[in-house]
Amino acid sequence: MKKYIFIVGLLFPYALFAQSILGKVTNEKNEPLVGASVFWANTTIGTTTGIKGEFELTTKDISPKLLIARYVGHIADTIEITNQTFVEFKLEQSQELDEVVVKGQRDGVIISNLNPIKTEQITQTELGKAACCDLAGCFETQTTVQPQTTNVITNSKELRILGLSGVYNQVLIDGFPMIQGLTYTYGISSIPGTLVDNIYISKGANSVLQGFESMSGQINVETKEPDKTDKLLLNAYINSFSEKHLNANYAIKKGKWSNLTALHTVQPANEFDRDNDNFLDLPKLTRYMVSNKLKYGNDADWGWNSRIGLRYVNEQRIGGQTSFNENNDKGSTEVYGQTVNINQPEIWTKTGYRLNDQHNFVLFASSFYQDQKSYFGTVKYNANRDQLLWKPSI
């Protein structure tokens, strides 16, 4: 009797062992695959491999005994289990796909549902629909803002919101009120379209953070960032009056520093009088503009960050009768004409230090000087203005 008990005792561990199967999962180089999934087909019974690619799985009440092994980036394999007590999976690496590029068409005009003030964003998609020689031309394809000609002799324009004159809305350049005072009449034409990245429009009374002028609305023009624009951009345009527009942008980036230099010039049109009223159909416009935008770091990163903008504009407009000579007929009572000469240097900076994700110290500062010498018929108009604005923010 003791003999039979001894034999049963020897067979009992084997009977327990037969209720499970051991195995290992490797790749083609016999390297163990850690975390591979091993499971019985058509069941929820499975396990994952350990640090050496080994596994143990029960075989009790499994039928049919089809054991499957899977691993990310490899082809799954199936082994039929009969009397085996140990199996080894050697998984082949699956073919890798080439890089997948997902492209989408951005809306031309975006209205934010998160901003408590209704704000429309005009993107590059919308700006590409119009020949945006200057900022006024950026609004030709939509009705949110109306570019309105205020003087046909010199072709001066202003931007109107809700039908109100341009003096009742505020135009910001990179968040700074640089179009003010003497530039209300001619300032929007001095911003070339090749520098505009996005335009944000808010209708109605808005924040007075940058000034009190936004009675009917606010237009914030974002210029291109030096670290996110094309390295080189060349642009030329000529209209039916033979007025020439030439633009050149050059951007460089090194480490946290980046810089964008832009050159812009307009050369005068030929003399046209198609309706034979003895007045020029289009004034002679000559403009030279140079701007530079220097950037260090990003305002979302901890530490120092800064943007510094410099711009200088020299502009001359001559309009009136076809026989008007700007050198001899200024203020004349015999030949009517208008001349406008503008010089404007400007500088602005946004410099800050971010302590953490919640606390950021920023200094906003801007300054410009405007000098305008003009003749409107017999009236001489000379004016100049300078402004210094600075504001700390936390």
Image (cartoon, rainbow, N blue to C red):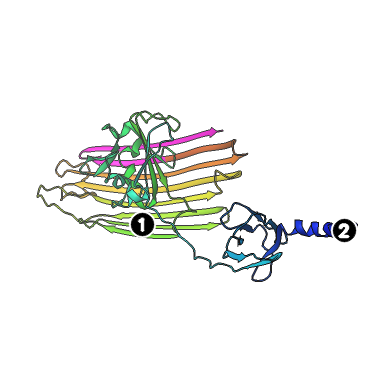
Circle 1 sits in a helix, a strand or a loop, which is it?
strand
Quadrant of the drawing holding the C terminus:
top right
Q: Which image quadrant is residue 4 in? A: bottom right
x and y, in percent, of residue 170 in the image: 37, 34
Residue 184 left/right relative to 100: left
Residue ID at (13%, 52%): 273
Q: Which residue is mark 2?
A: 6
Q: Is 181 situated above or below 93?
A: above
Residue 268 left/right relative to 222: left
x and y, in percent, of residue 71 in the image: 60, 61
Q: Is residue 371 magenta?
A: yes
Quadrant of the drawing holding the N terminus:
bottom right
Predominant SS of the magenta segment: strand
Dot label at residue 359: none
The disc labelled 1 sits on which kind of residue?
Answer: Asn
Sequence-earlier tag: 1 or 2: 2
Which stretch appears magenta?
A: 369-394
Label 2 CA crowd tier, 10 Å (few <14, some 14–19, many 20+) = few
Q: Which residue is mark 1?
A: 247
Q: Is residue 298 magenta?
A: no
Task: Determine the residue located farthest toward the right in the rendered image.
Answer: 2
Residue ID at (36%, 57%): 247
Q: Which image quadrant is residue 33 in? A: bottom right
